[in-house]
Amino acid sequence: QVQLVESGGGLVQPGGSLRLSCAASTNIFRMYSMGWYRQVPGTERELVASIVSGYSAVYADSVKGRFTISRDTAKNTVFLQMNSLKPEDTATYYCYLLTGRNSPKTWGQGTQVTVSS
């Protein structure tokens, strides 16, 4: 069973930056999609950014121009560079992986990001 391990969350001031990492226990080169969702307690999990078919990046409107998703296939890792962070970016961030278009998502355990002064 594939496992995903996230890291890089923490407390940062508004305007600051963080980089999240998601290391997969399998070769990600041929995975259909990998990316990040986030969730605030009491709300639904929302898509933040994803890489589809290895090259097409999709972003939520709220993070466009501030967040960048990338992957390193040699390290089987996906990254989320988050710049110009805002208090409304505060959430638990979850990495996911899709082996195929219709496959169920595999989730990481989540990493907390808190943006506060």
Image (cartoon, rainbow, N blue to C red):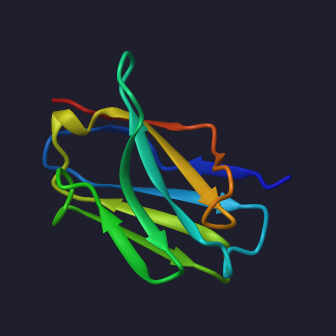
Front residue (pair 49, 9): 49
Q: Quadrant of residue 92?
A: top left
Q: How many marks?
A: 0
Residue 74 to residue 52: above or below:
below
Residue ID at (63%, 45%):
107
Residue 89 to residue 55: above or below:
above
Compared across the picture, whether 61 is left or right of 7 comes to left
Q: Quadrant of residue 60?
A: bottom left
Rendered location of residue 70, percent (x, y): 44, 74
Residue 53 to residue 43: above or below:
below
Residue reaching furthest right?
Answer: 1
Rendered location of residue 5, percent (x, y): 66, 50
Residue ID at (48%, 50%):
8
Residue ID at (34%, 67%):
58
Rendered location of residue 80, percent (x, y): 40, 61
Front residue (pair 56, 77): 56
Residue ID at (53%, 81%):
54
